[in-house]
């Protein structure tokens, strides 16, 4: 998307090299899942919607459609295609903004799935100084979506944060947006659609924030960089030249985009621990929806020091460095709306980007640890909606569940029992 390109070009220069390497590597990732052939064994099989994370892209992206690179199966082979062809799944992996805040991503996801114009909300867009409306979609990416044909939402990395806010908006809408727009408010902000969603699954998602954001102060780096750029070049020929190009991102000139990067409307802001606690405090676990959280860990406890060291699970050069940094980081106290959170040794296990403790359920949500080491399809039939299930922590790094540096056998073993389990969930309204 235009916004992606604009932000990527301008903001990535500001980011530290490690993160840039990480994101570019993630540009080569992919994922998948499956179950019994022909999709006939489950209680009720609903479509799967895979939502990518920061720096990611969907099947309708230039990367996939034109270049053949798939986020959800880079090195493991075309997993989503296999799910369709070999296991009969109906699934969707749309592209949404790869750098935006969870709010903006949620609005884009709704518009694309429904086939309508993106509406970021009158109140939100005014607060964050960008256009209220974005891309116009005329055909639903997900046909015939309704309370009778629910969906399973599966989000990797920041995509998991996005689908949680998306689910909240589908269920309860936004009082602020209803007040701002009255009858003209987007249907997304009206709420009342919790029963359009059967389950929410997050994979390697910074549900409780990332200590990397505190460690590297990434949000601050982005903000400082954007502010420095703006302050330095305001009124200059350079900035006027950029403005003259009239490249638009969410209706903003690129010069305005740089200013926007210094605001609170970014994924980086959303990944701060304090901001994650504030967001989680505003979310409601829906009584009809099943929630699952998968955390991955590329580290193991050092026997010599109070830190986690890499296992051979971390295969990406950029993630190796970050995994080691996060694995030895502790001591920071973060003030949040839910009280003080101490980043201690419990935050050291990580997947190279996200702390395992953060990728489990939101701290404030009702939750249950999966009772066994293994996951069997039969276990899903007796699960309870309205609470999170913390799945057994998996060995691997951030893009592992997306199929990077693993083979088809791994993907099948990881995904097929789980996806088959989703078919077994009782349907609630
Ligand atoms: Zn926004």
Image (cartoon, rainbow, N blue to C red):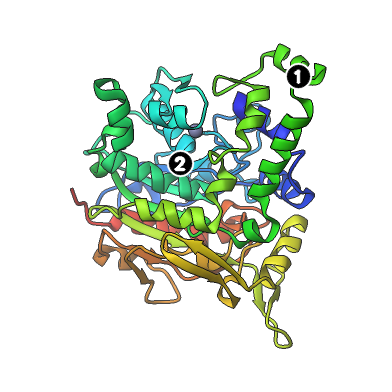
Name the residue at 66% across, 72% down.
299
Of tags 1 and 2, the one toward the viewer is 1
Residue 273 in the figure: left or right of residue 197: right
**Which residue position is annotated with label 1?**
235
Q: Which mark is residue 146?
A: none
Q: Residue at x 54, y 43 (%)?
A: 52
At x 63%, y 36%, the residue is: 261
- The x, y position of residue 104, in whole percent, is 48, 35
Q: Residues within 10 Å of mark 1 (few under 14, many from 20)?
A: few
Where residue 2 sits, quadrant-wise, is top right
Q: Residue 48 sits in which quadrant?
A: top left
Q: Residue furthest top?
A: 244
Q: Which residue is mark 2?
A: 84
Taking 318 as reference, is 1 left or right? left
SS for dot 1: loop
Q: Where's residue 21, x and y in %?
A: 76, 48
Label 1 or label 2, whichever comes before in sequence order: 2
Residue occupying image coordinates x 48% and y 68%: 340
């Amino acid at each position: 998307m235009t916004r992606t390109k604009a932000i990527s070009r301008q903001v990535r220069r500001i980011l530290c090299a490690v993160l840039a390497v990480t994101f570019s590597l993630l540009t080569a990732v992919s994922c998948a899942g499956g179950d019994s052939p022909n999709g006939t064994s489950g209680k009720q099989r609903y479509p799967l919607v895979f939502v990518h994370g920061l720096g990611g892209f969907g099947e309708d992206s230039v990367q996939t459609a034109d270049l053949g690179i798939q986020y959800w199966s880079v090195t493991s082979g075309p997993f989503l295609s296999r799910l369709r062809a070999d296991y009969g799944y109906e699934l969707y992996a749309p592209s949404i903004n790869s750098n935006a805040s969870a709010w903006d991503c949620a609005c884009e996801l709704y518009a694309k799935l429904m086939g309508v114009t993106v509406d970021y909300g009158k109140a939100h867009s005014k607060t964050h100084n960008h256009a209220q409306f974005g891309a116009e979609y005329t055909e639903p990416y997900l046909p015939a979506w309704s309370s009778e044909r629910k969906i399973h939402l599966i989000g990797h990395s920041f995509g998991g944060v996005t689908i949680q806010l998306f689910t909240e908006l589908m269920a309860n809408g936004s009082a602020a947006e209803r007040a701002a727009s009255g009858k003209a408010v987007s249907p997304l902000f009206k709420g009342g659609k919790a029963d359009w969603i059967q389950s929410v699954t997050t994979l390697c998602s910074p549900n409780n924030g990332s200590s990397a954001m505190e460690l590297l102060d990434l949000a601050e780096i982005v903000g400082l960089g954007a502010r420095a750029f703006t302050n330095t070049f305001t009124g200059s020929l350079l900035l006027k030249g950029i403005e003259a190009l009239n490249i638009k991102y969410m209706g903003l000139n690129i010069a305005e985009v740089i200013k926007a990067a210094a605001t609170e409307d970014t994924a980086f802001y959303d990944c701060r621990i304090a901001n994650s606690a504030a967001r989680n405090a505003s979310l409601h676990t829906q009584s009809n929806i099943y929630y699952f959280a998968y955390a991955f860990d590329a580290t193991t406890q050092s026997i010599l020091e109070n830190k986690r060291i890499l296992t051979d699970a971390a295969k990406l050069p950029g993630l190796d460095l970050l995994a080691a940094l996060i694995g030895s980081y502790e001591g920071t106290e973060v003030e949040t709306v839910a009280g003080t959170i101490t980043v201690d040794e419990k935050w050291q296990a990580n997947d190279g980007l996200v702390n395992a403790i953060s990728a489990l359920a939101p701290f404030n949500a009702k939750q249950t640890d999966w009772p066994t080491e293994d996951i069997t399809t039969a276990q899903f039939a007796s699960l309870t909606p309205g609470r999170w299930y913390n799945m057994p922590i998996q060995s691997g790094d951030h893009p592992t569940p997306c199929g990077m540096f693993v083979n088809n056998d791994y993907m099948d073993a990881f995904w097929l029992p789980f996806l088959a389990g989703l078919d077994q969930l009782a349907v609630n309204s």
